[in-house]
Amino acid sequence: ALALCQIQGQSSSESIAVFLHDAAANVRSSAALALGRCGGSAIKPLTTLLKDPEMQVRSSAALALGQIPDGRVTVPLETLSRDDNANVRFYAGCAFEQQNVFWKEILRLRPYKFRGQNLFAVPQPPNNDF
């Protein structure tokens, strides 16, 4: 699946998404990680994994969403950050940190506190001191 995404780019997300419904958790998990390399077109298929019964699959979905520099991943990551499983919450936090790096590089933003941690970024107000 990873090779397919590297060869075909974002258009391959539909081909990989088929594996998100496989009976084997390791196949769903691998497909999720591969989708993370496909860009914004993978967000919708990845959100189908938010309620997957397997912790490994939800964790992989969090990591995959973290690889996509797109503001639309915030809501699914917030959902995963409230997961019952501590590992899933940890990987959602890692994904938020990755998003923070993306946006800091792109927009030069200041950190925003969420549950006591710098997870998001918001624009700095202009300096009007004359």
Image (cartoon, helix red, strand yellow):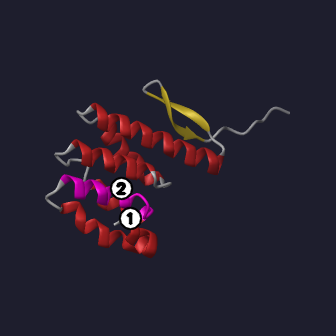
> Which quarter of the picture shows residue 80?
top left
The residue under label 2 is: 33
Query: Residue 113: where, in percent of width, then height?
Result: 50, 29
| Image point (30%, 73%), residue name | 15
Q: Are marks 1 and 2 in contact (CB under 8 Å)?
A: yes
Depicted 55 relative to depicted 106: above or below: above
Tag 1, which secondary structure?
A: helix
Left or right, 67 with respect to 109, comes to left
Residue sitting nearer the eye, 52 or 7:
7
Residue sitting nearer the eye, 107 or 34:
34
| Image point (37%, 44%), residue name | 77
Left or right, 4 with respect to 82, comes to right
The disc placed on residue 16 is: none
Depicted 53 relative to depicted 119: above or below: below
**Range of the magenta residues?**
25-40
Residue sitting farthest toward the right: 130
Left or right, 126 with respect to 12, comes to right
Tell me the kind of residue under disc 1. Leu
Query: Residue 71: where, in percent of width, then height?
Result: 47, 52
The residue under label 1 is: 2
Residue sitting farthest toward the top: 116
Graded by Cα atoms within 10 Å as few (under 14), some (14 to 19) or many (20 or more), the crowding at tag 1 reads some
